[in-house]
Amino acid sequence: MEAFFCKKTMLRTAGAVAVVSALAVMAGCSKSASEAPHQQQVAEVGVFKVAQAPLQITTELPGRTAAYQVAEVRPQVSGLIQKRLFVEGADVKAGMPLYQIDPATYQASYNSAKAALSKALANLLTAAPKVQRYKELVAIEGVSKQDYDDAVAAHEQAKADVESAAAALEQAKINVGYTHVDAPISGRIGRSTVTPGALVTASQTNALTTVQQLDPIYVDVTQTSEDMLRLKREVESGGLKKDGSQAKVTLVLSDGTKYAIAGKLQFSDVTVDPGTGNVTLRALFPNPKHDLLPGMFVRAVIESGVDEHAIAVPQQGVTRNAKGEATALVLNKEGKVEQRTLVTGATLGDKWLVKSGLNDGDLLIVEGLQKVKPGAPANAAKPVAAPSAVAVGGAVPANAKSAQ
C-alpha cells in the first residue's frame, strides 16, 4: 500500500515538473517574440550624389513688344484730301506718297512768289548801274552827295527785295511739296483715319495714319531693383562670370512656343519706378517675318552669367521645416543620416539651385525619406539619376548651352 502511494506521488511530481518546464519554454518564446520588434533595422534609401558643374544662370521676366520706330503721319498744310495712295496694313518705304492734298491754292502762291522774285530781280538790274554812274558824277560834282547816297540805298533795297522774294518762293515751293504727304520712315502702315474729301489742317491733333518699323523690334521687360542689385553683386564678387558686354536674350511667346531668333539686351533704365520698385530693361530682336507685333505679351529669358560652381539637386530631396527653412537629409561617411539647412536659389524645372548647405560629393537622400530620421543609420540602396538638363525657370547647364 505504501509503495502504491509513493508511486502515485512520483507521478504527480513528474507531471508538475513537466508543466513547469513547458511554461518556462513558453515564457522564453514569448520573451523572444516580444524582444524581436525592438531590434533596430537599417533602412535602405535612394541617394543623389551632389556634384558641382558650370551653370548658365538666366532670369525669366515678363514684358511686351514695342516698335523700333513709330511715326504718326500728320499734314503740314491745310486742304482737302484728294487721294489715298496706300493699302492699309501694307509695308511702305520712306518717302513713298501716302495722301494727296488739293495743291491748287499752294500752286497759285508759288506762281505769285515766282513773279515777285522776277520783279525784284528787274529792279536790281536798274539799281546797280545807277549807283555806278552816280559814283562817277559825284566825283566831278555832277550830282549831289545826297543823290548818290539815295542811289546806293536803293541798290541795297533792291538786293534785299530779291532775297526776300527768293525766300518766299522757296516757302511756296515747300508748301506745294507738303500737299504730297509722304511716309517719314519705312515700315508697316496702319489704318487710315480719313478718306478722300476730308478737310485736314496743318499739324492737327489726330494723325492721318501711323507707320511702325517692326524689324528689328524692341522687347521691354521689368525687373525688381532687388534682383538687379543681387545679380550685380554676384558678378562683381566673381560668383557669376559674364560672357561679353551684351547679354543674350531669348523669348517665350504667349502660347508657350519659343521664338526662333535670339536677341541682345540693349540697356537698363536709369531710374526705378517709385510705385512698383521695378527697373525697365530693353532688348532688341530681329523680326524679319514680322512674327512679333507691337503690344504682344512675351516672357524674356535673359542670360545673367555663368556660375562655375553651381549645385543643382532634385526637388524631392528638399523639404521645409516649421520656420520655413529649406532642409535636406544627407547620408554621411559613417553611414548615418545627417540633416542640413540649405540656402536655395532659383527653381530649375525639377531641380533646386542650392547656394549653401551641400558640398560636392554629398549623398542627398531623395527616396525613403519617411523611413529615416537624423542620427539613424541607413544604407544607400541605389543611386538616383541626375535631374533633367533643361531648365525651365532660372538656369541652363553651361555645357548644354550650345545644344539649345
Image (cartoon, grey):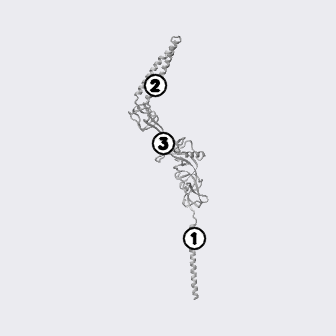
How crowded is the residue under tag 1: few (<14 C-alpha within 10 Å), some, or many (20+)? few
> In the image, what residue type sits under mark 1?
Ser
> Residue 367: x and y, percent?
54, 58
Percent position of residue 91, x then y: 44, 37
263 lies above or below 389 = above
Q: Earlier in the sequence, mark 1 or mark 2?
A: 1
Residue where numbered disc 3 is placed: 65
Marks 1/2: CA–CA distance: 121 Å
**Residue 300 % position (x, y):** 50, 45
Identify the residue under disc 2. 168
Q: Is residue 168 visible?
A: yes
Neighbor class of circle 2 (other Cα within 10 Å; few <14, some 14-19, many 20+) is some
Q: Secondary structure at mark 3?
A: strand
SS assignment at label 2: helix
Compare residues 45 and 354 and report the one nearer the observer: 354
Q: Residue at x 56, y 69 (%)?
A: 34
Examine the image and state in which quarter residue 30 appears.
bottom right
Instruction: Tell me, yes or no, whether the two marked residues, 1 and 2, touch with CB atoms within 8 Å.
Output: no
Which residue is rendered at x = 47% and y = 25% of the image?
A: 167
| First of labels 3, 1 by sequence position | 1
Q: Secondary structure at mark 1?
A: helix
Residue bearing the label numbered 1: 32
* Label 3 vs 2, first from the N-terminus: 3
Q: Nearer the viewer, mark 3 or mark 2?
A: 2
Q: Residue at x 58, y 81 (%)?
A: 14
Residue positioned most to the left: 197
Classify the position of the N terminus by image quarter.
bottom right
Q: Amino acid at mark 2?
A: Ala
Q: Amino acid at mark 3?
A: Thr
Q: Are marks 3 and 2 in contact (CB under 8 Å)?
A: no
